[in-house]
Image (cartoon, rainbow, N blue to C red):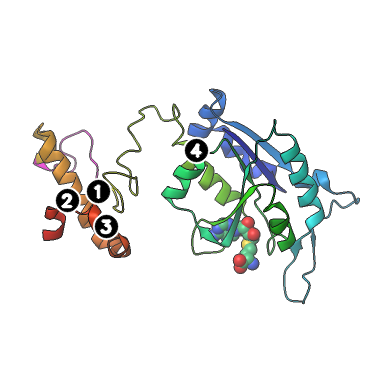
Amino acid sequence: MRLDVVTIFPEYLEPLNVSLVGKARARGRLDVRIHDLREWTHDKHNTVDDTPYGGGPGMVMKPEPWGEALDAVIESGTGDDKPVIVVPTPSGRPFTQALAVELSEKPWLVFTPARYEGIDRRVIEEYGDRADVREVSIGDYVLAGGEAPVLVMVEAIARLLPGVLGNAESHRDDSFAPGAMADLLEGPVYTKPPEWRGRGIPDVLLSGHHGKIARWRRDEAFRRTVANRPDLIERADPAVFDKKDREM
Ligand code: SAM
């Protein structure tokens, strides 16, 4: 998978060199290209922002550098491939595990983290024809810039790529994962030692009985979801719940 990021803070993306994403790059699973937006400015101050039309506080990112940058990135693609352009913005659609799965299946993503009050709207309209443009929010809060959201999204996407996680099964039981965990949060997890500060672990986990362990995990996932995210239960397709869930 190819990932391009256009930013005024290339150094903010340095965490993409470490841990899981760094290893995926080293193994050739991810081709990450970071671009400095200011390379596409032409004045001596490398200006990327200007005052908003209509007045008001803050600055807006100018369309010209973004246009030149995105043209250059898109033209560097081979053949007819169209990227998905991911525009981080608090006013976008929520970034969910389902969207992470969808994006992990695309060959090429271009991220456009903004600063100030965001990017001139015409840029988002302009690329609608030449790419699949997605405005995406990582949560209902406002950060100073889109670089941290890019780090969040890239990590969520990269760990889904085949061969990136040591154990391909690891994300199968994650919270929100399609399949067994659909619409549920993952329950508690334990490791050795069997007793720590007087606290043991649930007997069922030592039973070796796979069916009972699976049932216990399912029940704990259900309990945790009811306690922490009742909205997920309310929104869920009733078909994902079994008889035991309904009795709890
Ligand atoms: N005025 C904008 C608004 O209220 O929607 C907020 C702009 S914010 C200060 C600057 C940039 O940070 C955004 O354009 C976006 O790139 C990024 N950003 C901030 N919060 C975000 C979030 N929750 N999800 C995704 N990107 C975010």
- The amino acid sitting under disc 2 is Asp
Task: Residue 46: give x, y in percent of width and height.
Answer: 85, 51
Circle 2 SS class: helix
Q: Determine whether label 2 and label 1 are within 8 Å by CB.
A: yes
Observer-nearest of 33 and 233: 233
- Side of 202 where 230 appears, left or right: right
Q: Report helix, strand or loop for mark 1.
A: loop
Splitting the image into 4 quarters, where does residue 122 fall?
A: bottom right
Q: Earlier in the sequence, mark 2 or mark 1?
A: 1
- Contact check, label 2 and label 4, Cβ < 8 Å: no
Residue 219's tag is 2
Q: Residue furthest top?
A: 27
| Real-space Cα separation, disc 3 to disc 2, in angstroms | 10 Å
For numbered disc 4, what is the local secondary structure?
loop
Residue type for callout 3: Thr
| Segment colored magenta | 187-203
Cα–Cα gap, marks 2 and 4: 31 Å
In the image: residue 9, left or right of residue 155? right
Query: Which of pointers 2 and 4 indicates the residue nearer the eye?
Result: 4
Q: Main secondary structure of the magenta part?
A: loop
Could you tell me how far apart the alpha carbons at marks 3 and 1 are, in whole angstroms?
Answer: 8 Å
Q: Quick check: which quadrant has ligand 1? A: bottom right
**Residue for badge 3:** 225
Instruction: From the viewer's perspective, tell me whether residue 184 is left or right of residue 98.
Output: left
User: Which residue is tagged 4?
Assistant: 105
Magenta span contains residue 128: no
Give the residue pinned by disc 1.
Answer: 187
- Label 4 neighbourhood size at 10 Å, few (<14), some (14-19), many (20+)? few
Contact between marks 4 and 3 (CB within 8 A): the answer is: no
Q: Earlier in the sequence, mark 3 or mark 1?
A: 1
Mark 3 residue crowding within 10 angstroms, few (<14) / some (14–19) / many (20+) = many
